[in-house]
Amino acid sequence: MKCFFCKDEMTESTNTYMQDLGSCIVIIKNVPCMKCRQCGEVSYSGTVVRQIEKIVSDLKNSLTEVAIVNYSKTA
Ligand SMILES: [Zn+2]
């Protein structure tokens, strides 16, 4: 798989995903991704994106200001 931006090779890696929901910030650690060795661009597979959406929607109603989740424990 090639990077969309710089066309360099992307390699398997993990990333920390962060999303601000307004009332709550969700941080998901150890998210599997493809990362560009050149510019650091990160790309998630469809399965991973769906899992992130599920984690975020599960946390949406939580009253915590910052929710930190380990992806490897949810998949
Ligand atoms: Zn790149």
Image (spheres, helix red, strand yellow):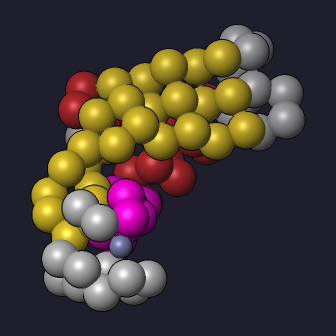
Residue at position x 53%, y 29% from top? Answer: 27
Instruction: State which quarter of the image contains the C terminus.
Output: top left
Magenta region, residue range? 39-49
Q: Is residue 61 left or right of residue 50?
A: right
> Is 51 or 8 nearer to us in this picture?
8
Using the image, determine if residue 44 lies above or below residue 28: below
Who's the residue at 30% across and 87% down the image?
7
In-image side of 65 versus 67 (left or right): right
Looking at the image, is 16 positioned above or below residue 40?
above
Res 28 quadrant in image: top left
Q: Residue drawn at (76%, 39%), measured in percent from left and top?
A: 21
Q: Position of residue 33 (x, y in %)?
A: 27, 56
Please indicate, yes or no, whether residue 34 appears anywhere in the rendered image: no
Please tell me which residue lies in front, 59 or 41. 41
> Does 5 sit left or right of 64 as displayed?
left
* Residue 50 highlighted magenta (yes or no): no
Residue at (25, 44) in percent of width and height? 14
Q: Is residue 21 above or below residue 24?
A: below
Image position, residue 5 (x, y; %) = 44, 82
User: Residue 65: x percent and y percent?
Assistant: 74, 15
Q: Is residue 49 visible?
A: yes
Residue 20: name its quadrant.
top right
Magenta-colored stretch includes residue 46: yes
Quadrant where the image shows the N terminus = bottom left
Ligand 1 visible in quadrant: bottom left
